[in-house]
Image (cartoon, helix red, strand yellow):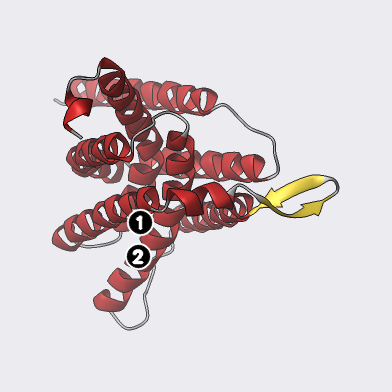
Amino acid sequence: MLDLLTDPAAWASLLTLTVMEIVLGIDNIVFISVLTGRLPKETAERARKIGLGLALIFRIILLLLLSFLIGLTAPVFSVFDHAVSWRDIILMAGGLFLIVKATLEIHKGIEGEEEHGKGGPQAAFAAIIAQIIVIDLVFSVDSIITAIGMADHVEVMIVAVVIAIAVMYIAAGPISNFIHAHPTTKMLALSFLLLIGVALIADAIGFHIPRAYIYFAMAFSAGVEVVNILAKKNRSKVTKP
């Protein structure tokens, strides 16, 4: 373990893995922000903490079960000559979940429907945490399997995950507040979730969409939306007497 502190290759892999985990964590932050938006401010903050805490726990557990994760990529059965692994099944289920959830949220936003959770606020909180757990597992499997080929030491992977989750925790609050302060950005975030869901399904059926394309589209759309918000503020200042 001490040898890693003086190993330049270990530091290089740590930096690479940390950046990769932060980038892949964007999906998690957007999903958690959208889900917690219907909760009161204090409860939403607690849900974000629990969601990111679970993401950290799942990733560390999966890293300690590397042999199990490697086994997830082994073919289980074939469909039209395409070998299907447990990883593919998990990604397919996660992608479908994201598409359904984002579609329902978009429908509620357009139709102006309010969500009335059965059993009151506690039941709504429990339902949101359950959904966060499901998608945390999907994103954890995807990111950790991607990380396995980038570092030779589990210790380096764990440190990278801890740093990435810490950055996500710092960013989650401001991002969530921004999304819910501007309704149009929430619709944009839901569109991102649809896009991510499609990408997960594409991965599951063997058609890999480079994440760089997806994140570029997200960044470009977010940039345009920021310009629109600034322009709207400027127009409101001009029209004020």
Residue 35: image tag: 1
Image quadrant in which the C terminus is located:
top left
Q: Which residue is mark 2?
A: 128
Badge 2 crowding class, 10 Å Cα cut-off, few under 14, some 14 to 19, many 20 or more, is: many
Q: CA distance from mark 2 to mark 1?
A: 6 Å
**Residue name at image x 75 percent, y 47 percent:** 83
Amino acid type assigned to the residue bearing label 2 in the image? Ile
Callout 1: SS: helix
Badge 1 crowding class, 10 Å Cα cut-off, few under 14, some 14 to 19, many 20 or more, is: many
Q: Residue furthest right?
A: 80
Q: Residue furthest top?
A: 8
The answer to whether the residue labelled 2 contacts the one labelled 1, judged by CB atoms less than 8 Å apart, is yes
Horizontal and vertical percent position of residue 38: 30, 60
Q: Is residue 115 above or below residue 201?
A: below
Amino acid type assigned to the residue bearing label 1 in the image? Leu
Q: Is residue 146 above or below residue 96?
A: above
Callout 2: SS: helix
Left or right: 154 as drawn, with respect to 2: right
